[in-house]
Image (tube, rainbow, N blue to C red):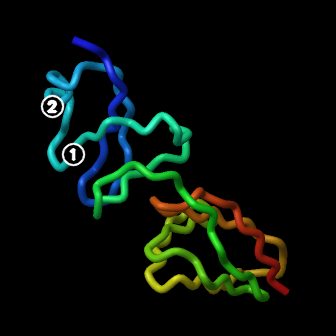
């Protein structure tokens, strides 16, 4: 038997839970409910890998392409999550409008399965 690297991922979202070096014959023993596995693509950096569930195939996360205008961020991937002041917000329309209590410079962390996470700076006046 030969050991290979596999990605264990959530079938519904494509989020990779972990990479495992093992024989394919024993990988199913490590799966949790709702998970599947794929042979890893060694050309993709592990930290940027996700599973495109329509394939399924392992792909590399892309760069986000968004616009910041004042207190509004548009063009975000759908769906994504934004973290602001420790609270997590689900973004379902690709837009965030920041209503801060006071003017200032704010950093929002945005993440999506198919895209690299980013910190986006928003200036509220």
Quarter where residue 19 is shown: top left
User: In which quadrant is the C terminus drawn?
Assistant: bottom right
Which percent across, then down, holds residue 28? 15, 31
User: In which quadrant is the N terminus drawn?
Assistant: top left
Which percent across, then down, holds residue 29? 14, 27
Q: Residue at label 1?
A: 35
Quarter where residue 11 is shown: bottom left
Relative to 44, say whether 79 is above or below: below
Which percent across, then down, holds residue 64? 62, 68
Quarter where residue 99 is shown: bottom right
Relative to 78, say whether 13 is above or below: above
- How far is disc 1 from disc 2 in space, using C-alphas? 9 Å
Q: Residue at label 2?
A: 28
Relative to 37, say whether 92 is above or below: below
Q: Going by the image, does 11 lie left or right of 68? A: left
**Residue under the image location 46 percent in, 77 percent down:** 78
**Residue under the image location 38 percent in, 45 percent down:** 16
Relative to 66, say whether 13 is above or below: above
Which percent across, then down, holds residue 10? 28, 50
């Amino acid at each position: 038997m030969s050991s290979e690297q596999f990605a264990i991922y959530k079938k519904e979202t494509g989020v990779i839970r972990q990479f495992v070096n093992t024989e394919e014959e024993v990988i199913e023993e490590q799966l949790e409910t709702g998970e599947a596995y794929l042979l890893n693509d060694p050309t993709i950096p592990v930290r940027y890998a996700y599973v495109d569930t329509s394939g399924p195939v392992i792909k590399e996360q892309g760069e986000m392409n968004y616009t910041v205008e004042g207190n509004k961020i548009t063009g975000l991937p759908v769906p994504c999550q934004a973290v602001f002041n420790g609270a997590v917000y689900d973004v379902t329309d690709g837009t965030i409008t920041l209503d801060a209590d006071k003017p200032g410079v704010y950093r929002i962390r945005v993440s999506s399965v198919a895209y690299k996470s980013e910190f986006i700076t928003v200036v509220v006046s």
